[in-house]
Amino acid sequence: NFCDGMWLLVSQKSSNVKQSVVVKAQLPSDELRRIWNNGNKVTTLAYAHGKWVIVSEPGRTSGPIGQTFYASNTGFPIRKIREFYSQKKRIHSLIYADREGIWAMILEPRTEGQPHQRVHYSAEFPERRLMEMGVGVKHANP
């Protein structure tokens, strides 16, 4: 991810998991299809300074990963998100490519027993909405 003017990558060395990192200047639709066609899953999708970054690793040994990609340059895709939720999908990654004006999502199937996600978007921190959902918000004293 990119924050506070720095690229941030959290990773661990493992003999069991072989992560791959791909950096592209354009929307990485073809690269995502290649990753999934090779049986891998996307663990991170990021964008900053005109660069798309995909981190992937080998997927399940049997059955499809089920991840899909959606991108739109027509504003925040709340209607599409609701449509995906009705199809029992959940958001794995949701990013905004500011230089390109593109919202991009990696989606995956919601499995039995997983709670339903909710998306709330606002220019202000959604404290009231969090409290309505039963999430405690504490303000630390300076």
Image (cartoon, grey):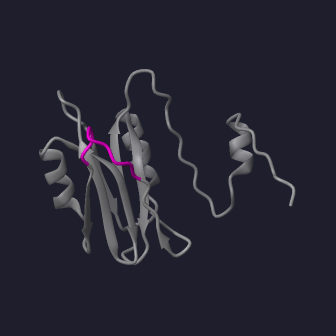
Q: Residue 142, image x and y in percent?
A: 86, 61
> In the visual, does 84 lie left or right of 58?
right
Is residue 66 visible from the viewing direction of this image?
yes
User: 69 or 18: which is nearer to us?
Assistant: 18
User: 98 or 62: which is nearer to us?
Assistant: 62
* Residue 99 sits above or below residue 131 on the image: below
The stretch in magenta equals 11-18
Residue depicted at x 49% and y 32%: 116
> In the visual, does 60 lie left or right of 101?
left
The quadrant holding residue 72 is bottom left
* Residue 34 sits above or below residue 50 on the image: above
The quadrant holding residue 26 is bottom left
> In the visual, does 130 lie left or right of 87?
right
The number of discs equals: 0
Q: Residue 19, image x and y in percent?
A: 27, 50
Residue depicted at x 18% and y 46%: 36
Give the farthest residue toward the right: 141
Q: Residue 60, image x and y in percent?
A: 23, 32
Magenta residue check for 52: no
Quadrant position of the N terminus in the picture: bottom left
> In the visual, does 119 lie left or right of 89?
right
Q: Residue 135, image x and y in percent?
A: 70, 37
Mostly what secondary structure, the magenta segment?
loop
Is residue 102 visible from the viewing direction of this image?
no
* Residue 142 sits above or below residue 120 on the image: below
